[in-house]
Image (cartoon, helix red, strand yellow):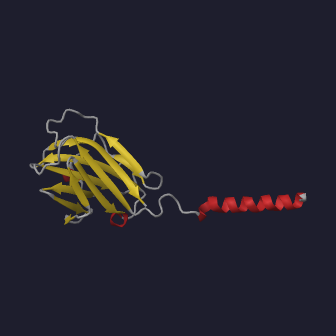
Amino acid sequence: MSMRSSLLILASVALIVAGCAHGEQPSWGEGAKSVIITVTTQGEISTSMEYFIALDTDGNLLTGPGDDPTQWNTFYRLRWANGNFYFRKPGESEQFFTNSSVAGNTITVEVDMDDLGDPSLLDIMVVTTDRGGNLVDALANYFTVRLGSQSYVSRSDASSEVSNPQGDIVRVEVEVKR
């Protein structure tokens, strides 16, 4: 093989590799279909409690939800109360939500990415309250899932001073389904 042929082959391979590296392959975020959120509490899920999940999709890592569900008007919100699930989009009213389940001490919800506006980041906060709206437990701070590069994120709640085990958040897991 001549030097000229070798250089031609190397140049062709380099062009193919460069083309693939510059957007011809789908990114990690393309094809994300839904997000599955699993909340585990120390005690069994109870109708004497309300369980909230906030999802912030604005892409700003500094503006995520705090621990007061009454202040979540600009976030997507999931709520389990009285044995039913509800979903609220920002600025809209709550609707029944059926893509969810409760088993023992675990709540699982699956939210379609289209319902969230197909974001690239999710800031997630989980809170439990008693039926009167009094805070029982919350994550220490919201956490971020980068949908383009993370397919699974798990956070444990370090606080152990919650008097009601049914409201004591132990872990939150987020799985991105593609």
From the viewer's perspective, tell me whether residue 130 is left or right of residue 9.
Answer: left
Of all residues, the one furthest to the right in this rendering is 2
Measured as percent of width and height from the top left, residue 95 is found at 20, 66
Q: Is residue 63 visible?
A: no
Who's the residue at 23% across and 66% down the image?
Answer: 92
**Residue 89's quadrant in the figure?**
bottom left
Task: Give coordinates of residue 59: x percent, y percent.
Answer: 40, 55
The one of 166 and 137 positioned closer to us in this rendering: 166
Would residue 1 appear left or right of 138 to someone viewing this image? right
User: Is any part of residue 115 visible from this angle?
Assistant: yes
| Residue at image location 25% in from the left, 45% down from the top | 40
Which residue is nearer to you in this view: 128 or 76? 128
Image coordinates for residue 93, horizontal then vertical, percent: 20, 65
**Which quarter of the figure is the C terminus placed in?**
bottom left
User: What's the residue at 89%, 59% (across, down)?
Assistant: 1
Outermost residue on the top side: it is 161
